[in-house]
Image (cartoon, rainbow, N blue to C red):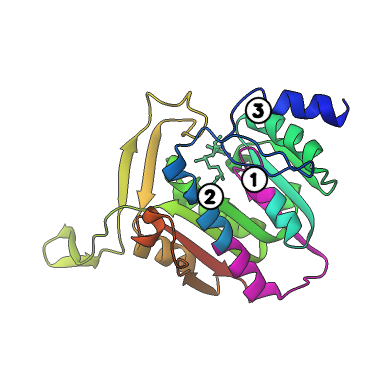
């Protein structure tokens, strides 16, 4: 397919992201205008974190983008200096889209595969310097398991971006009123069971969103050496500005 036919195919529809193509054309996003800032803010936070961690010109680093959708962040990982990027998503239609956009963006160091996050392992898939898990955790019924997968694939830094719910702390009677346990946090249960056909939704329908403190505690508990809540930039998308969505970095020193 030549560039003109590729662009004609791409512009026939709207996309989750605005992709800026080398031709100067951009894709139309189906997100309402006021929500599109969610991508811009997350991208800015990703770029700042990677630059702070790896410096201006990182050498020979690799990345995996878990739940990559149409590959928007995979391309930015490549642009940030990753030698090789792998994007995986449970939905084959996203992988087809990601490959189409990848041809138009002319990146030859990104590969996409239809995979469920729970099918990944370091033994089969290797490890990656950077692991990205954006917009996935709160669509899962086993978020702790997914964080363990992300940690197992990670050599240096893992960025988790998620919607969060309210926090619970204090003491809980644990078998007897004289035997209590401290509560380390909470998950909010959300029903997406009638929306599993939606392109951005859970594949199973029962979703657990952690509180911010719970996410940080779990990431520390499963073995990240350092865990840091990233600060939203000036003018951040409202959800991120007000802490309803957060980005947390786990580092392996
Ligand atoms: C809200 S979108 C986030 C997409 C992208 N990471 C972002 O932040 O813009 C959620 C994505 O998770 C994918 N997904 C849901 N469950 C998954 C699973 N178990 N394994 C891999 N991908 C999954 C969906 O297909 C969808 O692309």
Res 92 label: 3
Ligand 1 within 8 Å of disc 2? The answer is yes
For mark 3, give the secondary structure. Answer: helix
Residue topped by disc 2? 39
**Front: mark 3 or 1:** 1
- At x 46%, y 41%, the residue is 33
Res 72 label: 1
Would you say the residues marked 2 and 1 are in contact, meaning their CB atoms lie under 8 Å apart?
Answer: yes
- Whether residue 222 is visible, yes or no, is no
Disc 3 crowd, CA 10 A, few/some/many (<14, 14-19, 20+): some
In the image, the segment drawn in magenta is: 45-74
* Inter-mark Cα distance, 2 to 3: 22 Å
Sequence order check: which comes first, mark 3 or mark 1?
1
User: In the picture, residue 98 is in which quadrant?
Assistant: top right
Sequence order check: which comes first, mark 2 or mark 1?
2
* Inter-mark Cα distance, 2 to 1: 9 Å
Would you say the residues marked 3 and 1 are in contact, meaning their CB atoms lie under 8 Å apart?
Answer: no
Between 95 and 172, the residue placed more toward the observer is 95
- At x 45%, y 70%, the residue is 231
Q: Position of residue 174 (x, y in %)?
A: 20, 59
Sequence order check: which comes first, mark 2 or mark 3?
2
User: Looking at the picture, does residue 39 appear above or below residue 174?
Assistant: above
Between 172 and 168, the residue placed more toward the observer is 168
Q: Going by the image, does 136 lie left or right of 188?
A: right
Between 5 and 66, the residue placed more toward the observer is 5
Q: Position of residue 4 (x, y in %)?
A: 83, 28
Res 11 label: none
For mark 2, give the secondary structure. Answer: helix
User: Looking at the picture, does residue 95 appear above or below residue 148?
Assistant: above
Ligand 1 within 8 Å of disc 1? The answer is yes
- At x 55%, y 67%, the residue is 250
């Amino acid at each position: 397919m030549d560039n003109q036919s590729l662009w004609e195919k791409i512009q026939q529809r709207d996309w989750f992201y605005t992709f800026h193509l080398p031709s100067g054309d951009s894709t139309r996003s189906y997100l309402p205008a006021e929500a599109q800032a969610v991508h811009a803010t997350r991208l800015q936070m990703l770029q700042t974190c990677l630059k702070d961690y790896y410096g201006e010109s990182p050498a020979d680093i690799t990345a995996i983008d878990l739940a990559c959708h149409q590959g928007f962040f995979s391309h930015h990982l490549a642009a940030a200096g990753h030698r090789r990027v792998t994007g995986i998503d449970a939905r084959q239609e996203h992988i087809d889209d990601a490959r189409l956009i990848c041809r138009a963006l002319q990146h030859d160091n990104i590969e996409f595969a239809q995979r469920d996050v729970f099918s990944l392992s370091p033994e089969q898939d290797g490890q990656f310097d950077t692991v990205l898990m954006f917009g996935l955790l709160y669509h899962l019924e086993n978020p702790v398991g997914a964080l363990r997968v992300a940690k197992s694939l990670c050599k240096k830094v893992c960025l988790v971006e998620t919607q969060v719910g309210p926090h619970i702390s204090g003491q809980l009677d644990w078998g007897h009123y004289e035997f209590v346990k401290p509560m380390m946090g909470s998950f909010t249960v959300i029903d997406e069971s009638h929306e599993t056909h939606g392109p951005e939704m859970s594949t199973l329908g029962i979703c657990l969103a952690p509180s911010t403190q719970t996410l940080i505690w779990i990431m520390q508990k499963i073995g990240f050496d350092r865990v840091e809540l990233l600060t939203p930039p000036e003018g951040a998308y409202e959800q991120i500005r007000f802490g309803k969505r957060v980005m947390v970095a786990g580092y392996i020193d």
